[in-house]
Amino acid sequence: MAHLDPVDILLVEDNPYDVELILRGLEQHNVTNKVRVVKDGAEALDFIFCTGAYAHRTIGDTPKVVLLDLKLPKIDGLEVLQRIKSDERTKVIPVIVLTSSQEKRDIVESYRRGANSYMVKPIECDQLFRCVAELGFYWLVCNKPPC
C-alpha cells in the first residue's frame, strides 16, 4: 500500500454531523491543512501507532495536532489520550479534547492523562466554527512544537 501524505490534524470523532461541522469550520477559516478523520478510538490508535490498516505508515509521521472526542466506540477517548501520552514516541503530540462533556471528572481526568487543552463543543454552529478555526490556527501556525 502507498505511503499516505502527512497529516496535520487527526480528527477523532464518531458523530458524522460533528465531523461535518468541524471540517466546515476549519475550511471557512482556511485551516484545512491535511485533515484525517477516524471514527473510533481503535482506529485512532492504529493511525497514531501505525498498526492494523495503517501499518504502512511511519510512526515518525505524527499529526501536528489531535482533536479528540471522549465518547467514542471501541476504545474511549480517555484511553486513547493515555496511550498517546504514555508512549515516548508520541507523547509530544498536542491532543485537544473536543467534546460535548462538561463533566468536571472528564475535564480533570483529561488533563491528568496529558491533554494539552479541553474544549466543550459549542451548541451554536458559528461559535463552533470560530472555536475550531482558532484551535487549528493556534496549534498549526502559532504553536512551536518541540521537534
Image: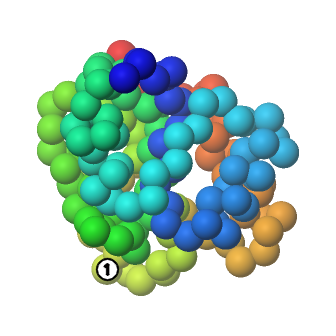
Q: Position of residue 141 (x, y in %)?
A: 63, 26
Few, some or many C-alpha atoms within 10 Å of disc 1 (few <14, some 14-19, many ≥20)?
few
Residue at x 28%, y 56% (from the top left corner): 42
Whether 55 is drawn above or below 111: the answer is above
Query: What amino acid type is highlighted by mark number 1?
Result: Arg
Say above or below: 32 vs 58: below
Question: Does residue 52 sit above or below 67 in this rendering?
Answer: above
- Report helix, strand or loop for mark 1: helix
| Quarter of the figure with the C terminus | top left
Quadrant of the frame with the N terminus: top left
All told, the count of numbered labels is: 1
Q: Is residue 108 left or right of residue 100?
A: left
Residue 28 visible: yes
Answer above or below: position of 39 versus 48. below
Task: Please tell me in which quadrant of the rendered image residue 134 appears.
Answer: top right
Q: Image point 58% across, 38% down: which residue?
A: 35
* Identity of the residue furthest to the bottom in this view: 103
Return the residue nearer the eye: 140 or 35.
35
Is residue 97 visible from the viewing direction of this image?
A: no
Q: Residue visible at 53% across and 41% down?
A: 36
Q: How is the image coloured?
A: rainbow
**Horizontal and vertical percent position of residue 70:** 39, 68
Please tell me which residue is depicted at 28% across the width and 68% down the height of the picture. 74
Between 1 and 52, the one lying in front of the other is: 1
**What is the residue that sits farthest to the front in this orientation?**
1
User: On the image, numbered disc 1 is attached to which residue?
Assistant: 105
Of 32 and 15, which appears nearest the observer? 15
Residue 131 position in % (x across, y down): 70, 56
Residue 117: x and y in percent read: 46, 53
